[in-house]
Amino acid sequence: QLDGGYRAYRRHVVGQLETLPPRFRFVVLCGLTGSGKSRLLAALAAAGAQTLDLEGMARHRGSLLGGFPGVAQPSQKAFETAIAASLRALDPARAVFVESESKRIGKLQLPETLLGGMRRGRSVTLVTALPQRVALIKEEYCLRTDDPATLMQRLEPLAPLVGKAVLKRWEVFAAEKNWDALVGELLSLHYDPLYTRSLQRNFSAGSDSGGEAIDVTDTSAAAIAMLAADVLAMNDAQAPLLVDSP
């Protein structure tokens, strides 16, 4: 317990967010929206790997439709406190798996030192076909398929980006409950270009050690568990004998 109350504790957290991330060797799970990154991260954790679940701590999936149903995001300070606590519990001698993220998850901003450590990490990119990604999005995201009008209200901010004609077409898809068509276009016309730009901006230029691409043809729980085992074996084969700590 720190003397000095909350202010001293807050300074301690801020200091740890500067000093802890450089100690770790991050393996960054990349892939377009719906490729199965979150499922793989959970499967890796279940298999005993070290993971940093930033979206879980942020209570948000990091996109316009990424809010957790009925759950508010924490404050920035609470988010940073959770990150620091998670990092303290990890072993710097072992790899830490984390999803690729932009600078913000919903309303919350990632600590710059952590983002820098992730950028220097090795990437594992999931390559998943559009039909499988559409199916996963329908399962995991709160699309409010029971309330097309509310869904379209949430998509309204995209009008300047995709155009009013596209938004009108999506409104027709929603009214007809043609969710495959709506989600498919939402991915191909908005999320995929957005994610690709974010990935190039945040990770491609800063990665020290390259990475691997893995074709994902099945995003079921059993298949993702098998994929997690493969990723762990691949990581063990590439793990350095020594891990330098600052």
Image: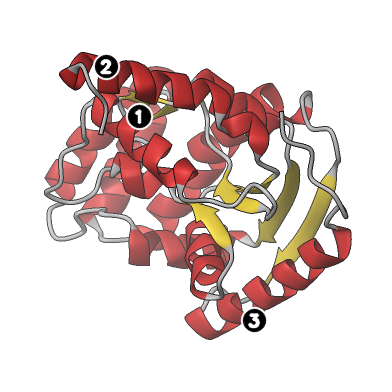
Pointer 3 residue: 226
User: Residue at horizontal 21%, vertical 36%?
Assistant: 73
In the rendered image of this protein, does residue 219 appear above or below residue 98?
Answer: below
**Residue 8 numbered mark, or none:** 2
Could you tell me which quadrant the C terminus lies in?
Answer: top right
In the rendered image of this protein, does residue 70 appear above or below residue 58?
Answer: below
3 or 1: tag closer to the N-terminus: 1
State the image coordinates of residue 124 (x, y, percent, origin top left): 72, 53
**Residue 80 numbered mark, or none:** 1
Residue 85's quadrant in the figure?
top left
The residue type indicated by label 3 comes to Met
**Dot 3 surroundings within 10 Å: few (below 14), some, or many (20 or more)?**
some
User: Residue at horizontal 49%, vertical 80%?
Assistant: 221
**Dot 1 surroundings within 10 Å: few (below 14), some, or many (20 or more)?**
many
Image depth: mark 2 or mark 3 in front: 2
Which residue is farthest bottom? 222
2 or 3: tag closer to the N-terminus: 2
State the image coordinates of residue 69 (x, y, percent, origin top left): 17, 51
Way the structure is coloured: secondary structure
The residue type indicated by label 1 comes to Glu
Give the CA distance from mark 3 to mark 1: 32 Å
Q: Are marks 2 and 1 in contact (CB under 8 Å)?
A: no
Could you tell me which secondary element the residue under label 1 belongs to? helix
State the image coordinates of residue 186 (x, y, percent, origin top left): 44, 43
